[in-house]
């Protein structure tokens, strides 16, 4: 069984107006990327890093210059992917007319029969019950986004592509959209989105793919999902499936912690330290990063990455399979 | 003031000739704008959305033809439909058909160019939204038309305003024949030359009323969009 929804190989894309300039760097250069089915994948990156372009390519709205895209193992061109993948733009375009008309149109486009009550069910799902007769273009920014998502859901797509769903909406709406996205994933839908909002990306995503100048790059973070246990005082706890982390005390309902790989220290011998997070595990891999930097991956029940310099690696004198002590301060644990 | 009073009396009395002239003008203008729109609207879309050899040349020609004087169109069609012209055997000269042909030639560049301009300014999110939601072929094109009905209607109404107010084509190709090809503008021209201003002024008021209604409709169409 194929558990990947998209597989990208040697993909290159350059916008047409830049073709004449042979020195122009392609907007996207992806040698190999695998996107898992039934997960929330977030593309993250600076403006112009190629996030939206990549979403459009996956949605069949742009054709790459070269490379191969497989959708569930079948080349994109020969699959009926365009009926199963729907993209919701950052500022969605809503058709003139009512919310009801907007939701009914995709069924007409795809010549599908509409089940009775489907529109009401879908509107209820996105929290817009009773909005059927409202003029779609007169809704607020957050409501428009939800109408666009509801419209996309009408034909039950397998993949939902969301371009910055959290952009230009207030905190409350952003949280509601997060819950909606997670709910859709739990119903089996694959969701690929791009976002500038770190909190949104960390909380919702099963995987984050960083893009830098159109190329996927290794991100420098350890991200864990779990539940926050608040305690009065300086420190509280965050529990994942098999680990308990010490983190700063802060009121709130947090579901995700992020620890920068730069903040994770590794030693061969267990050290006595005032740091509160001490783990140990087997060194799984040592990978060269860039400019005198290495990424160590240690299996402590969960995989933890540490980024160190080459001189530190030399001093550590560790090899794959060695047992290492992993130490990081509670203040290195960021709550989202 | 007496002339104005007489003109208003003509309008309110429902003078048969005045009504016939107005209906003839409206019939010619409506027919020509419908036929020109049937060609001009798709042509405007094609010129913007499709790439083919000669596209830019067609655009330049269409934009140049927007400034074409009505008498030049009249003269051009006259040379074709006159007895000695290539279409002379069809006996079209001084018939409503000749006037409508001339008006179509006059208004087609306006409708095409305005639709082209509207499509150029189309919200770039619209095509992507339609594609991602699965619209294609007929449904795609119908949705483009539906979503752009405001600017397209503006183009059609602007074209209608141009033909209802033109005099050169109607005069040269229609011959200003009473009860047959006499239109509002040709009557105004004739009556003024005869020094009989009442009918001319009455028709002028009707023409202004039509222009006002057109502008109101354009405003309404654009506002609703």
Image: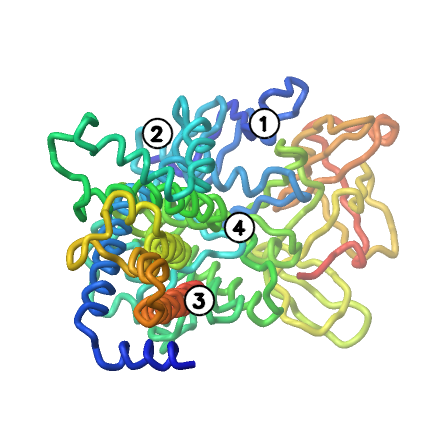
Q: Output the chain of dot 3.
A: B
At x 76%, y 69%, the residue is A249
Q: Residue B215 location in percent, x, y?
A: 42, 66
In the picture provided, is A70 more to the left or to the right than B74? right
Co-location on one chain, circles 2 and 1: yes
Please name the residue that numbered disc 4 is placed on.
Answer: A163
Residue under numbered circle 3: B219
Q: CA distance from mark 3 to mark 2?
A: 45 Å
Dot 4 or dot 1: first in sequence order is 1
On the image, numbered disc 2 is attached to which residue? A77
Judging from the image, mark 1 belongs to the subunit labelled A
Callout 3 touching callout 2 (CB < 8 Å): no
Where is residue B12 shown, x and y percent of the image?
A: 26, 81
Name the foreground residue: A36 vs B9.
B9
Q: CA distance from mark 4 to mark 3?
A: 35 Å
Mark 4 falls within which chain?
A: A
Going from N to C along the chain, the mark reached first, 4 or 2, is: 2
Residue drawn at (78%, 45%), measured in percent from left and top?
A264
Q: Secondary structure at mark 1?
A: strand
Q: CA distance from mark 4 to mark 1?
A: 20 Å
| Image marks 2 and 1: residues in contact by CB distance under 8 Å | no
Q: Is the residue under label 1 in contact with that under label 4 (CB below 8 Å)?
A: no
- Mark 1–mark 3 distance (CA, rounded to whole Å): 48 Å
Callouts 4 and 3 in the same chain:
no
Q: Residue at x 37, y 48 (%)?
A: B130
Residue A230 visible: yes
Label 4, label 2: how far apart the Cα atoms are: 22 Å
Estimate how packed mark 4 is, as few (under 14), some (14 to 19) or many (20 or more) residues with alpha carbons within 10 Å: many
Query: Which one is in front in this view, the residue at disc 4 or the one at disc 3?
Result: 3
Label 3 vs label 2, nearer the camera: 3
Chosen colour scheme:
rainbow
Q: Which quadrant holds residue B222? A: bottom left
């Amino acid at each position: 069984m194929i558990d990947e929804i998209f597989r990208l190989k040697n993909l290159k894309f350059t916008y047409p107006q830049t073709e004449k300039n042979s020195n122009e760097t392609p907007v996207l250069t992806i040698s190999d990327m695998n996107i898992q089915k039934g997960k929330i994948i977030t593309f993250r990156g600076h403006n112009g890093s190629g996030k939206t372009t990549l979403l459009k390519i996956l949605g069949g709205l742009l054709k790459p210059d070269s490379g191969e895209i497989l959708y569930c193992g079948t080349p994109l061109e020969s699959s009926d992917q365009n009926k199963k993948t729907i993209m919701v733009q950052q500022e969605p375009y809503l058709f003139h007319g009512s919310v009801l008309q907007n939701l009914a149109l995709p069924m007409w486009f795809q010549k599908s029969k509409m089940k009775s009550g489907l529109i009401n069910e879908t509107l209820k799902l996105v929290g817009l019950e009773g909005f059927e007769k409202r003029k779609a273009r007169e809704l607020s920014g957050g409501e428009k986004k939800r109408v666009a998502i509801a419209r996309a859901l009408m034909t039950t797509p397998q993949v939902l592509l969301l371009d910055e769903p959290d952009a230009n909406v207030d905190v409350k709406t952003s949280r509601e959209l997060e819950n909606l996205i997670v709910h859709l994933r739990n119903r089996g839908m694959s969701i690929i989105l791009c976002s500038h909002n770190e909190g949104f990306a960390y909380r919702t995503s099963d995987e984050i793919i960083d893009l830098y100048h159109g190329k996927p790059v290794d991100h420098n973070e350890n991200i864990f999902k779990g539940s926050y246990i608040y305690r009065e005082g300086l420190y509280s706890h965050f529990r994942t499936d098999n680990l308990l982390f010490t983190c700063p005390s802060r009121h709130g309902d947090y579901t995700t912690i992020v620890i920068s790989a730069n903040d994770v220290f590794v030693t061969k011998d267990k050290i006595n330290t005032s740091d509160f997070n001490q783990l140990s595990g087997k060194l799984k891999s040592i990978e060269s990063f860039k400019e005198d930097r290495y990424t160590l991956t240690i299996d402590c029940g969960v995989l933890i990455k540490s980024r160190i310099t080459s001189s530190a690696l030399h001093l550590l004198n560790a090899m794959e399979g060695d047992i290492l002590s992993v130490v990081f301060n509670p203040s290195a644990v960021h709550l989202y | 003031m007496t002339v104005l009073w007489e003109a208003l009396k003509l309008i309110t009395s429902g003078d048969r000739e005045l009504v016939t002239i107005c209906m003839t003008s409206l019939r010619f203008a409506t027919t020509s704008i419908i036929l020109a729109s049937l060609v001009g609207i798709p042509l405007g879309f094609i010129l913007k959305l499709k790439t083919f050899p000669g596209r830019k040349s067609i655009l330049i020609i269409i934009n140049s033809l927007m400034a074409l004087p009505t008498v030049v169109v009249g003269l051009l069609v006259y040379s074709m439909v006159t007895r000695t012209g290539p279409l002379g055997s069809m006996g079209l000269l001084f018939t409503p058909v000749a006037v409508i042909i001339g008006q179509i030639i006059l208004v087609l560049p306006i409708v095409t160019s305005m639709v082209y301009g509207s499509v150029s300014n189309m919200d770039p999110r619209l095509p992507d939204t339609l594609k991602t939601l699965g619209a294609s072929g007929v449904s795609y094109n119908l949705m483009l038309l539906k979503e752009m009905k405001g600017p397209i209607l503006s183009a059609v109404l602007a074209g209608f305003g141009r033909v209802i107010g033109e005099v050169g084509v109607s005069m040269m190709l229609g011959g200003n024949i009473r009860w047959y090809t006499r239109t509002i503008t040709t009557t105004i021209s004739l009556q003024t030359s005869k020094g009989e201003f009442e009918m001319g002024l009455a028709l002028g008021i009707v023409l202004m009323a039509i222009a006002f209604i057109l502008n109101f409709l354009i405003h309404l169409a654009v506002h609703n969009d």
